[in-house]
Image: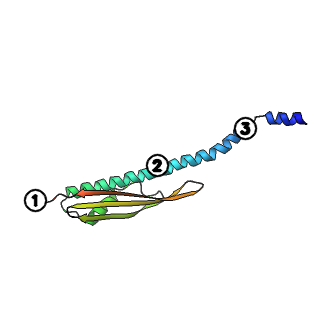
Amino acid sequence: MTKILKRLWANESGANIIEFAIAVPVLTVFIYGIFVVGKLFEAQAGMQHALGEAARYATLFPTPTDDQLKAKMAAKKFGVTGNGGALSALSVSTSGNTKTLSLTYTQQTNFLLFKGPNVSLTRTKKVYLAVPAA
């Protein structure tokens, strides 16, 4: 009887399928997590692009309204839709001859097997307006 147990204990056939069954779910969650973080980086790049376009618009045109700047930001954003997240704030504030443009994006992270925290990204850009010659 002990010879049978020793032979079964020494038998390693099937060990790699057990290792595979343990490693694949962990690897899948890691790969999906990298994808989720990549989508957040894409959203951040899209927000920065929208702010840059609105800032360029504000410096090229002498008196852009806040609504025009918000429309420009909304039109030029990318990467912030279809990910389960949304732009939660689009704001423009004026102080003297500067305008401060701000975008906030919030997304609930999902890592397949569990829900992650809400991630909120905020990007701000200060624009110095051209003062028309008197």
Badge 1, how many Cα within 10 Å: few under 14, some, many 20+? few
Which residue is at 10% across, 59% downward? 133
**Cα distance in 3D space between marks 1 and 2:** 46 Å
Task: Please give left or right for residue 40 compared with residue 51 in the image.
Answer: right
Q: Earlier in the sequence, mark 1 or mark 3?
A: 3
Q: Which mark is residue 133?
A: 1
**Cα distance in 3D space between marks 1 and 3:** 80 Å
Q: Which mark is residue 38?
A: 2
User: For numbered disc 1, what is the local secondary structure?
Assistant: loop
Q: Earlier in the sequence, mark 1 or mark 2?
A: 2
Q: Label 3: which residue?
A: 15
Q: Amino acid at mark 2?
A: Gly
**Cα distance in 3D space between marks 2 and 3:** 35 Å
Q: Are marks 1 and 2 in contact (CB under 8 Å)?
A: no
Q: Are marks 1 and 3 in contact (CB under 8 Å)?
A: no
Residue with the most extreme left position: 134
Q: Amino acid at mark 3?
A: Ala
Q: Are marks 2 and 3 in contact (CB under 8 Å)?
A: no
Q: Which mark is residue 49?
A: none
Badge 3, how many Cα within 10 Å: few under 14, some, many 20+? few
Task: Please give left or right for residue 108 compared with residue 60 in the image.
Answer: right
